[in-house]
């Protein structure tokens, strides 16, 4: 009887784990809806107009990427041109033309 009870508890735990993972995936699927992307694109265009109106041409920003290959990069722009990109954790330069940074 003890083995059966353990099996039952494991089954419930496994089911709850799968249901939790599915709910996360369903929530994440929202990112793939065209209306969500359109909202983000509209906001990006609005912010770009503000940026251009202010005449900003030199700046530094940090790009934080999460996912399978996470990284943090500091990017320096002068006269609307990327002058350097540096991995924050190591201080190494990001190779020119690196995927995901172009």
Image (tube, rainbow, N blue to C red):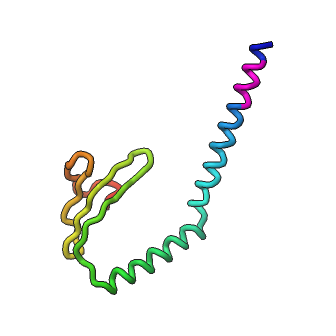
Q: Is residue 102 left or right of residue 43?
A: left
Magenta-highlighted residues: 5-12
Q: Is residue 75 left or right of residue 50?
A: left
The image shows residue 42, relative to residue 100, as above or below, that is: below
Where is residue 87 shown, x and y percent of the image? 26, 51
Task: Identify which residue is drawn at 34% across, 80% down.
Answer: 51
Quadrant assignment, res 46 = bottom left
Task: Identify which residue is drawn at 24% across, 74% down.
Answer: 80
Where is residue 79 shown, x and y percent of the image? 20, 76
Where is residue 17 shown, x and y percent of the image? 65, 37
For this rendering, which residue is in front, 93 or 8? 8
Secondary structure that dominates the magenta span: helix
For this rendering, which residue is in front, 54 or 32? 54
Task: Identify which residue is drawn at 66% across, 48% down.
Answer: 23
The mark total stands at 0
Answer whether residue 9 is magenta in the image: yes
Quadrant assignment, res 76 = bottom left
Task: Identify which residue is drawn at 26% across, 51% down.
Answer: 88
The quarter of the image holding the N terminus is top right
The image shows residue 2, relative to residue 21, as above or below, that is: above
The image shows residue 19, relative to residue 36, as above or below, that is: above
């Amino acid at each position: 009887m003890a083995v059966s009870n353990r099996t039952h508890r494991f089954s419930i735990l496994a089911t709850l784990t799968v249901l939790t993972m599915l709910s996360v995936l369903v929530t994440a699927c929202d990112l793939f809806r065209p209306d969500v992307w359109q909202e983000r694109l509209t906001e990006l265009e609005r912010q770009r107009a503000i940026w251009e109106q202010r005449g900003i041409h030199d700046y530094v920003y940090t790009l934080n990427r999460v996912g399978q290959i996470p990284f943090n990069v500091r990017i320096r722009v002068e006269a609307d041109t990327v002058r350097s990109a540096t991995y924050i954790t190591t201080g190494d330069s990001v190779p020119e033309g690196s995927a995901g940074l172009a």
